[in-house]
């Protein structure tokens, strides 16, 4: 799978002028995002998420390492030809109308006037701003500005979207619509790099995530893999007597009753199957066997808290293998 | 080209939306209207029979007044006045262009497009220069037409004098851009540019200042500043001399045009090149 975005050993140290103070915002980050993939960048404040995005867009220069978009170094403005960006806290010129905003930024992205004529109404409809096309941006609410920002990021039909807190200030219905829009874009092959504090949103939208802490990726992978609790399962069946649980424990499994079901932790898949066979042999009717998962929030909080002891090098983040389900 | 057009259009749109364009035009119109109301000439058969300034009759004396020479005097005096007015208005109207562009949340929107930093900065510069240039054309053009309407005489040199004014504006705007890139402050850009304007004007008398200084290093410092800074004083004088065709200078001071225009142009070019360099290297 071709990576549309790749970074290798990306580091950034900010130096304060007239002072010896240095802040290492990024520390050897490796990152790859493939076409059609929705990738989430997580991390506490100051973890290096925005710095990463800014380096990828050429807004900030890396201290070391290299980054490429579509095979072009990020220092080349041409690398941004197929990139749409929605910055956090963006400020469109308030004197422009929504239509003029899309026209100005569309032309700056190389879209022809004739294309814009058709594209602008289509985009305004897509972000539910059709009735606001000729209203000045300064009259827009936060949510409307955010939706206009998304339209502006999409105006030139980009193949990579970099979005910093895209649902900030947007109501729940609007959030859902933005999520759907991102999935639609991903379905047509657009890669999306999503930077958000809203873990539930990341969980609902992203295929893979990376958790940054102090400029390093401390975990990365598919959300299902990160939230999986080994071979822990919710086991429901009848009858479930103490003798059966004792049998499970004798085989080396952990078994405990939790709110009417049994939390069963096996060593591996073979062990799990053996436990199910043993229960069936005792006449137990199995009605549910579900893998237990942590929430992304649990994983995130654990990583950020426990991360203090894990200061070794950055994690390599690669796209999923070809054909692997997302 | 598309980027340049989009940026120039935006500079004008912003100027219109923020009342800069209105204020610019209103102030220029005020100067023109003041001139139109203040000067009343009574021309009979191509000769000046009488003149009023701010309603007060001017003593013409027993000698006949050469109307052509009188108009030339007006034009040269006014070109010096317009030099100062147009330059000041231009600095006020364009000093915000870079600091506003560099504001957090705004710069990201521009730099995330497939546009190089230098073309982005230069397109703002071109937009600002066009805005200032239009005002110079309006000021000089309207004033020339008024003179022609009131006297039937006008000299093409008066209109061409606008080019020297625009040259000065281009130089000072380049410096304002440099300060804007470094400080991101409109106020500091305006203050620093006016400081250069006045300091350079004072330094046009550098020989007298040097002679009054006690030490050689202080004199060398003054001389150094004189050569580095734009020659705003001499350029004003050059504008007046150019419009009058050198006929009306009371104190004939030789101007080394090549040195004045050359060093001023160099100051502008270096300022613009440095602002482009710093803008390219800056982290946002």
Image: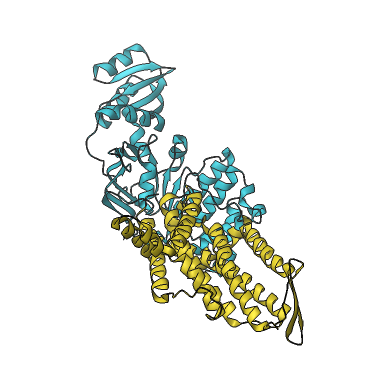
Chain colours: A cyan, B yellow
Residue most extreme to the top: A242
Toward the viewer: A112 or B44?
B44
What residue is rendered at 62% in x and 49% in y?
A138
Judge whether B19 appears above or below B48 on screen: above
Residue B21: image location, x then y, percent: 62, 61
A67 to the left or right of B252: left
Judge whether A323 appears above or below B120 on screen: above
Residue A209: image location, x then y, percent: 36, 41
Residue A13: image location, x then y, percent: 29, 43
Judge whether A303 appears above or below A15 on screen: above
Residue most extreme to the left: A312
Q: Quadrant of residue A269?
A: top left
Q: Quadrant of residue A210?
A: top left
Toward the viewer: B208 or B7?
B208
Residue A313 is at least partly visible in this image: yes
A258 to the left or right of B106: left
A124 to the left or right of A23: right
Q: Quadrant of residue B140?
A: bottom right
Residue most extreme to the front: B62
B175 to the left or right of B240: left
Judge whether A307 appears above or below A189 on screen: above
Toward the viewer: A297 or A308?
A308
Residue B120 is at least partly visible in this image: no
Residue A313: image location, x then y, percent: 22, 39
């Amino acid at each position: 799978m071709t990576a549309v975005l790749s970074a290798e050993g990306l580091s950034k140290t900010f130096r304060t002028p007239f002072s010896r103070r240095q802040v290492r915002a990024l520390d050897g980050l490796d990152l790859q995002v493939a076409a059609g993939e929705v990738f989430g960048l997580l991390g506490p404040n100051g973890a290096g998420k925005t710095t990463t995005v800014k380096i990828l867009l050429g807004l900030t220069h890396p201290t070391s390492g290299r980054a490429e978009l579509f095979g072009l170094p990020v220092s080349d403005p041409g690398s941004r030809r197929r990139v749409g960006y929605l910055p956090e806290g963006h400020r469109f010129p308030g004197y422009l109308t929504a239509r003029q905003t899309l026209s100005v930024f569309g032309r700056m992205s190389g879209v022809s006037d004739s294309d814009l004529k058709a594209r602008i109404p289509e985009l305004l409809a897509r972000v539910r701003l059709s009735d606001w096309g000729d209203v000045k941006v300064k009259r827009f609410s936060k949510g409307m500005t955010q939706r206009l920002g998304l339209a502006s990021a999409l105006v030139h039909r980009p193949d990579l979207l970099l979005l910093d807190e895209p649902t900030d200030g947007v109501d729940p219905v609007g959030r859902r619509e933005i999520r759907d829009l991102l999935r639609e874009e991903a379905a047509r092959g657009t890669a999306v790099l999503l930077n958000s504090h809203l873990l539930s949103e990341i969980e609902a939208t992203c295929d893979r995530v990376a958790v940054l802490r102090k400029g390093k990726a401390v975990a990365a992978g598919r959300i299902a893999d990160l939230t999986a609790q080994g071979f822990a399962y919710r086991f429901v069946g009848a009858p479930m007597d103490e003798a059966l649980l004792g049998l499970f424990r004798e085989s080396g499994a952990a078994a405990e009753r939790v709110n009417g079901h049994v939390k069963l932790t096996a060593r591996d898949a073979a062990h799990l199957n053996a436990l199910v066979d043993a229960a069936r042999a005792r006449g137990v009717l199995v009605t549910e066997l579900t893998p237990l998962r942590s929430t992304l929030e649990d994983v995130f909080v654990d990583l950020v808290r426990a991360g203090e002891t894990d200061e070794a090098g950055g994690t390599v983040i690669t796209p999923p293998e070809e054909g692997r389900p997302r | 080209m598309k980027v340049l057009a989009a940026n120039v259009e935006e500079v004008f749109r912003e100027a219109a939306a923020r009342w800069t364009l209105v204020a610019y035009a209103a102030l220029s119109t005020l100067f023109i209207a003041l001139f139109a109301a203040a000067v009343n000439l009574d021309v009979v058969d191509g000769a000046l029979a009488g003149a009023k300034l701010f309603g007060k009759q001017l003593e013409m004396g027993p000698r006949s007044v050469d109307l052509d020479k009188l108009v030339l005097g007006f034009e040269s005096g006014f070109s010096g006045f317009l030099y100062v007015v147009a330059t000041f208005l231009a600095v006020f109207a364009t000093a915000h262009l870079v600091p506003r562009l560099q504001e957090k949340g705004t710069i990201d929107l521009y730099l995330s497009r497939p546009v190089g930093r230098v073309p982005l900065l230069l397109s703002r510069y071109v937009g600002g220069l066009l805005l200032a240039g239009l005002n110079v054309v309006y000021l000089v053009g309207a004033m020339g037409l008024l003179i022609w309407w009131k006297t039937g005489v006008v000299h093409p040199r008066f209109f061409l004098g606008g080019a020297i004014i625009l040259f000065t504006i281009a130089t000072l705007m380049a410096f304002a851009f440099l300060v804007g890139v470094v400080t991101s402050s409109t106020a500091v850009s305006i203050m620093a540019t006016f400081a250069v304007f006045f300091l350079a004007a004072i330094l046009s008398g550098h020989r007298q200042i040097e002679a009054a200084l006690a030490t050689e290093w202080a004199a060398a410092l003054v001389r150094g500043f004189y050569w580095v800074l734009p020659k705003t004083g001499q350029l004003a004088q050059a504008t007046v001399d150019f419009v009058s065709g050198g006929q009306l200078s009371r104190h004939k001071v030789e101007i080394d045009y090549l040195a004045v225009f050359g060093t001023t142009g160099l100051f502008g070019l270096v300022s613009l090149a440095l602002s482009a360099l710093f803008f390219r290297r800056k982290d946002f």
